[in-house]
Amino acid sequence: RKEVEQDPGPFNVPEGATVAFNCTYSNSASQSFFWYRQDCRKEPKLLMSVYSSGNEDGRFTAQLNRASQYISLLIRDSKLSDSATYLCVVNRAPAGNKLTFGGGTRVLVKP
Amino acid sequence: SQTIHQWPATLVQPVGSPLSLECTVEGTSNPNLYWYRQAAGRGLQLLFYSVGIGQISSEVPQNLSASRPQDRQFILSSKKLLLSDSGFYLCAWSLATSSYNEQFFGPGTRLTVL
């Protein structure tokens, strides 16, 4: 089993719609969780950290379910500029300063 | 604010040639530093990480090496490149004091070995 698993997609999303996707992680001791965004041929950029209580940043909402070991990302009112690959990232407990990246979920927002 | 630089942006090298990629961070002290490789259509693979000058940990056996000669400088090297070394090389930093360990990436070097 991979340490971090994601549906590779692509998720084809009409502009203005809502899209949500999950990732699962295998290390129950992990303490830090993130979503990164990666545009084609560019570096990953931190989208948001995911906290136990869940958190929201504008149109983006992240949730953490420790019992089932999954993280979700929801994008509301999708924009064309949201088209990207979204990487689910989990720290490698107990060596917390190293991260494991999922393979990414590709999202394509279309007019 | 902190910034991270990598160069060169692109590189085409023949098999068997040496490699040196450089990464520098500005605006922070004693960062944790990381080298990743992303092969075409694949996920990020951690190659090396460093918690201080001269302290390098290798994640996977390979013909690459890393050095940290200064606090905010991280270098990735190879004596002889292989075709399989082609990929997108990313340097990242994180605050050593951060409990959550967010990492921030440089713009990357796209290496093609022919």
Image (spheres, coloured by chain):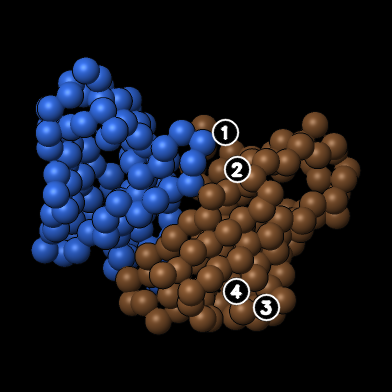
Chain colours: A blue, B brown
The kind of residue on which mark 1 rests is: Ala
The kind of residue on which mark 2 rests is: Phe
**Disc 3/disc 1 C-alpha distance (Å):** 31 Å
What residue is pinned by disc 4?
A: B72
Compared to B8, does B111 lie above or below? above
Q: Nearer the viewer, mark 2 or mark 4?
A: 4
What residue is pinned by disc 2?
A: B88
Q: Find out whether the residues at labels 4 and 1 contact each other: C-beta distance under 8 Å.
A: no
Circle number at residue B70: 3
Residue found at the very far right of the displayed protein:
B16
Sequence-wise, the earlier of marks 2 and 4 is 4
Q: Residues within 10 Å of mark 2 (few under 14, many from 20)?
A: many
Task: Point out the image quarter for the N terminus of chain A.
Answer: top left
**Disc 3/disc 4 C-alpha distance (Å):** 6 Å
Q: Give the chain letter at badge 2.
A: B
* Relative to A21, A101 lies left or right: right
Q: Residues within 10 Å of mark 1 (few under 14, many from 20)?
A: few
Residue beneath the point at 35% across and 54% down: A46
Q: Nearer the viewer, mark 1 or mark 2?
A: 2
**Disc 4/disc 1 C-alpha distance (Å):** 28 Å
